[in-house]
Amino acid sequence: MSAVRIIAHIPCGDTVLVAEARGMREGLPYFGWNEAPAGLYTATQLREAGLSAAGLDPRALLVFRHRKPYARQTVAELFAVADAVERPVPSQAQQVSRLRNLQYAMRARRTCVDCAEEKDYCVPTSTRQCWSCLEIEMSNDVEVAA
Ligand SMILES: [Zn+2]
């Protein structure tokens, strides 16, 4: 990591944020973890604040690695919170439709592909079979192998 830093001028609403960035990447100043100036949010942070990143251009990037050794470098776009608008509240129809889709998806996760029975637990995603069907199949495998 080079020690050369740049002074970034980031438009944010009616003001300009001046901050020391690690450099430029994809034409945007980038910051490390905990280095981004207040006033810049990731899309997730905007959503948590009840705001939307829709239609916004990223003003900077957040570049960091996870603690886990296998995790690669993550790049997140940073948006000016002053430019964000409130997230629209979903309509009654949208809420009903989301709930219906969720119930449909959960029914699919509880339904065994072999006996087509809906269980009171989610079947494993690897086999999509309920425990009894999986047990039958495993005992058949043992007989074949013997
Ligand atoms: Zn089954």
Image (cartoon, helix red, strand yellow):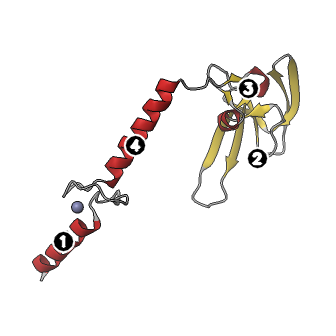
State which mark lies toward you, 1 or 2: 1
Amino acid type at image mark 2: Trp
The CA distance from mark 1 to mark 2 is: 51 Å
Residue indicated by mark 2: 33
Of mark 4 and mark 1, the one earlier in the sequence is 4
Near-viewer residue (88 or 84)? 88
Amino acid type at image mark 1: Ile
Of mark 1 and mark 3, the one earlier in the sequence is 3
Residue indicated by mark 3: 59
Which quadrant of the view contains residue 40?
Answer: top right
- Image check: 87 left or right of 111? right
- Image check: 10 left or right of 55? right
Q: Is mark 3 within 8 Å of ligand 1?
A: no
Residue indicated by mark 4: 103
Near-viewer residue (115 or 146)? 115
The CA distance from mark 1 to mark 3 is: 58 Å
Q: Quadrant of ligand 1?
A: bottom left
Residue 110 image position (x, y, % from top left): 33, 54
Q: Is residue 6 visible?
A: no
Q: Secondary structure at mark 4?
A: helix
Q: Secondary structure at mark 1?
A: helix
